[in-house]
Amino acid sequence: MNKPILVFDLGGVLMNHNTPAYLAAMEQLLGRELMRQLGIGSPGNPSDFSLLAQYERGEVESADFIGKICAMAHQRIRPLAVVHAWNLLHGGIPSSRLDYLRLLRAQGYRLYLLSNNNDLRWKHTCSEYPELPHLFDRCFLSHEMHCTKPGKEIYLRADAEIRMNTALEHAPSQGSFSSGLSTFNSQSSIIFVDDIEENRQSATQFVGWQTCASMDDLQHLLQPSSPI
């Protein structure tokens, strides 16, 4: 039996959320009603029609996103103030989680990232943790793929690429691509780690992935030991 392929969410799984500081800073700039209109601060995934959802799908450039927020605000605010408040949501990635990713790679696991993200926060993450993208075989990012969780498309596309990559990896030993794909389908599984229940349900419904809600849950699935 092959090792399962592991797919991780970023915020709330690898990256801690500094939600109180983020919401307080955004409320000071925008007020609660404008935050609601923009889709900022609502639990779970934003409405498909909100500016935030459009930004996460890469339909709005960062400069336009910031410009629209500044234009809609009831007070004069600086673009840099918006960027600062926006990035406050990131509460850092504990070193123990990065160490665990390195350990999993060293043990031969294939790792993928599947994140509803946006240009500003991804650049901020990579500047703070330049190693992070290189710990994964592929980073599936909503703003680059132009689709978001929990929608069907992002799971189908991620699943297809993961299966393709794995089939190509097994093809030399199996003698052909089709044999490699058959080996993956019969002997491998995919585990998806996401803190939002709706995203986990979609992953199971649309592509049949096994899911769990946290790094601790994943560690217990793979090898029971002390929590991360």
Image: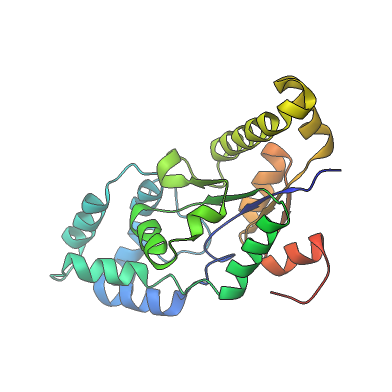
Query: What residue lies at 55% left-to-right and 75% top-to-bottom?
Result: 94
Left/right placement of residue 192 relative to residue 131 reads right
Query: What residue lies at 34% left-to-right and 71% top-to-bottom?
Result: 32
Left/right placement of residue 188 relative to residue 130 reads right
Assign the C terminus to one quadrant of the image.
bottom right
Query: What residue lies at 21% left-to-right and 55% top-to-bottom?
Result: 68
Total numbered labels placed on residues in the image: 0
Left/right placement of residue 136 relative to residue 29 reads right
Between 182 and 201, the one lying in front of the other is 182
Whether residue 213 is visible: no
Between 9 and 196, the one lying in front of the other is 9
Q: In the displayed orientation, state which residue is furthest to the left.
A: 76
Whether residue 196 is visible: yes
Query: Quadrant of residue 151 in the image?
Result: top right
**In this picture, is 196 found above or below 149?**
below
Query: Quadrant of residue 97 in the image?
Result: bottom right
Query: What residue lies at 68% left-to-right and 57% top-to-bottom?
Result: 106
Q: Position of residue 35 (x, y in %)?
A: 34, 65
Q: In the displayed orientation, state which residue is furthest to the right.
A: 1
**In this picture, is 227 found above or below 37?**
below
Assign the N terminus to one quadrant of the image.
top right
Q: Position of residue 102 (x, y in %)?
A: 62, 62
